[in-house]
């Protein structure tokens, strides 16, 4: 708990290897969503502090780029060990500022560690290829070179994991990296940067600048920033994508989601109910891969509806560090009001509220931002609620007469982050995998989160760009290809 005390102050930025207090004139409060108690204050850093970070990153780049990949990954091996050592402390900080349960925070940290582990393979992943004798005596090759200064802008729902989708890959490839974390959850990532410092990484290879729009805009427009990775809501993703592209940058922008799960009557209903409950209500529904709409087919309309309503109604909601708590609060009072407003909107559009999580009393946590699991039945696919990302613990139920119609319902969504099917029929599963218009598909899996060695493949309004985060895509995103064609005439060799 001593670390938590140490952070109840104004948070500094980390620029050029040093912790610096910001000269910001505005600071935002960072609170525990389970109580709204103050944890820290985060600076709304002015653009010139971001420029300092960019200059420090640009100065560090030439030497870092020349550091052999084998040496670069030694820092990541150290980081992997340190993250294991501090995993519990970081997980507790995540729960304190984000609200998710301690089990969910530990799982988040495991995924952050996984990204570091994958980036340790950069000596293999970054290799180019070569073909001798493309014409007699002429060889041609591709090599991959780092871009320079790259930056990431990240959301509130995974305070450490999402920054780690980018940081390890970016620096393993030889880039220098700047993070602008979410202003709602800057505490755990600040601690993660203190831990990164312990690896002895050269100054300026990674920097952390807190802030909001002014900080983001500086990163998007500064000529020395080569590439931008963004994760957040779709309207901001579109803004970031178009603005950074207009300034000639490479961009990958992961946006919002409205994920569907299709439940066929031949599914293992007990397993399906457990998994969909975790997917819809885990992290209080604030996962970009959370199931938001369950499309039931045939008899599943009744069996799944009854089972999920019972399971969701029995979830224990409370402060994520308390024993036995299965779901925490949502991030802010404004989120709670917005989610509860959308539930009311659904009801007014004709949906039946099977489980109403609005304005719950959570004993001992009366001032927290709690919404209990909510289930709406019969949400019409063409209504606003079916199209809106709720980003809270709300599951809508829709009925379809078969897989064909279920896929048609999915297709009407502007989002395409993830979609899952629960069935014991191989034919139905294959049809779904083949036709479902989403980039991350689950078959009897509720949260189809790709491992760090596969790309995080959102589609449609859930992703703007070409190369995704993680896996081989990340290596391609963070490097430029150079093609070299060489001729070494024979007579020159004869000299020796
Ligand atoms: P957000 O879009 O409000 O904020 C994300 C980042 O953008 C933050 O760092 C914020 O400071 C910055 N930002 C916000 N408004 C800005 C503006 N006008 N100009 C410039 N920068 C701005 O998102 P959030 O509420 O923090 O996160 C939740 C959203 O993130 C949800 O929509 C969720 O689906 C999405 N998300 C997507 C993925 C994915 O992989 N597709 C993963 C996690 C979260």
Image (cartoon, helix red, strand yellow):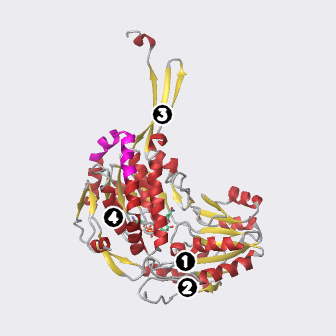
- Asked whether the viewer can see residue 222, the reply is yes
Mark 3 falls on what kind of element?
strand
Residue corresponding to mark 2: 357
- Mark in front: 4 vs 2: 4
* Cβ at disc 4 under 8 Å from ligand 1: no
Q: CA distance from mark 3 to mark 2?
A: 56 Å
**Of residues 221 and 116, which is closer to you in this image?**
116
Magenta region, residue range: 59-78
Mark 3: few, some, or many residues within 10 Å (few <14, many ≥20)? Answer: some
First-in-chain label (2 vs 1): 2
Residue corresponding to mark 3: 142
Q: CA distance from mark 2 to mark 1?
A: 8 Å
First-in-chain label (1 vs 3): 3
Q: Residue at x 56, y 56 (%)?
A: 457
Residue 483 position in % (x across, y down): 46, 32
- Ligand 1 is found in the corner quadrant, namely bottom left
């Amino acid at each position: 708990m001593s670390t938590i005390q140490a952070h109840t102050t104004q948070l500094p930025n980390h620029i050029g290897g040093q912790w610096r207090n910001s000269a910001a004139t505005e600071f935002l409060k960072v609170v525990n969503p389970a109580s709204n108690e103050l944890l820290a204050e985060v600076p709304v850093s002015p653009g010139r502090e971001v420029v300092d970070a960019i200059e420090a990153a640009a100065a560090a780049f030439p030497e870092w780029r020349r550091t052999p990949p084998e040496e670069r990954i030694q820092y990541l091996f150290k980081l992997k060990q340190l993250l294991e050592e501090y995993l519990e402390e970081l997980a507790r900080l995540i729960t304190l500022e984000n609200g998710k349960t301690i089990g969910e925070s530990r799982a988040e940290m495991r995924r952050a560690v996984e990204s570091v582990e994958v980036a340790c393979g950069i000596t293999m992943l970054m290799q180019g290829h070569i073909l001798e004798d493309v014409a007699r005596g002429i060889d041609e090759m591709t090599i991959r070179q780092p871009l320079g200064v790259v930056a990431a802008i990240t959301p509130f729902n995974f305070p450490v994991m999402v920054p780690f989708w980018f940081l390890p890959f970016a620096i393993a490839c030889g880039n220098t990296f700047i993070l602008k974390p979410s202003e709602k959850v800057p505490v755990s990532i600040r601690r993660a940067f203190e831990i990164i410092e312990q690896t002895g990484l050269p100054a300026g290879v990674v920097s952390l600048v807190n802030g909001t729009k002014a900080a983001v805009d500086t990163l998007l427009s500064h000529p020395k920033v080569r590439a931008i990775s963004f994760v957040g809501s779709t309207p901001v993703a579109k803004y970031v994508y178009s603005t950074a592209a207009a300034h000639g940058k490479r961009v990958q922008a992961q946006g919002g989601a409205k994920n569907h799960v299709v439940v066929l009557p031949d599914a293992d209903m007990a397993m399906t109910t457990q998994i969909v409950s975790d997917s819809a209500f885990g992290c209080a529904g604030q996962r970009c891969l959370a199931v938001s709409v369950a499309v039931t087919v045939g008899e599943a309309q009744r069996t799944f509806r009854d089972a999920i309503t019972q399971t969701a109604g029995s979830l224990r909601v409370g402060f994520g560090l308390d024993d036995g708590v299965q779901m925490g609060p949502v991030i802010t009072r404004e989120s709670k009001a917005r989610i509860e407003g959308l539930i009311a909107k659904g009801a007014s559009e004709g949906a039946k509220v099977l489980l109403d999580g609005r304005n719950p009393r959570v004993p001992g946590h009366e001032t927290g931002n709690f919404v209990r699991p909510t289930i709406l039945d019969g949400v019409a696919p063409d209504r606003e609620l079916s199209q809106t990302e709720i980003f809270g613990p709300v599951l809508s139920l829709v009925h379809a007469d078969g897989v064909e119609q279920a896929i048609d319902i999915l297709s009407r969504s502007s989002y395409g982050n993830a979609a899952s099917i629960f069935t014991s029929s191989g034919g139905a599963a294959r049809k779904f995998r083949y036709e479902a218009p989403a980039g991350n598909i689950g078959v009897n899996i509720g949260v189809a989160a790709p491992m760090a060695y596969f790309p995080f493949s959102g589609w449609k309004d859930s992703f703007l760009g070409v190369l995704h985060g993680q896996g081989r895509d990340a290596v391609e995103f963070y490097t430029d290809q150079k093609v070299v064609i060489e001729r070494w005439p024979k007579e020159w060799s004869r000299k020796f």
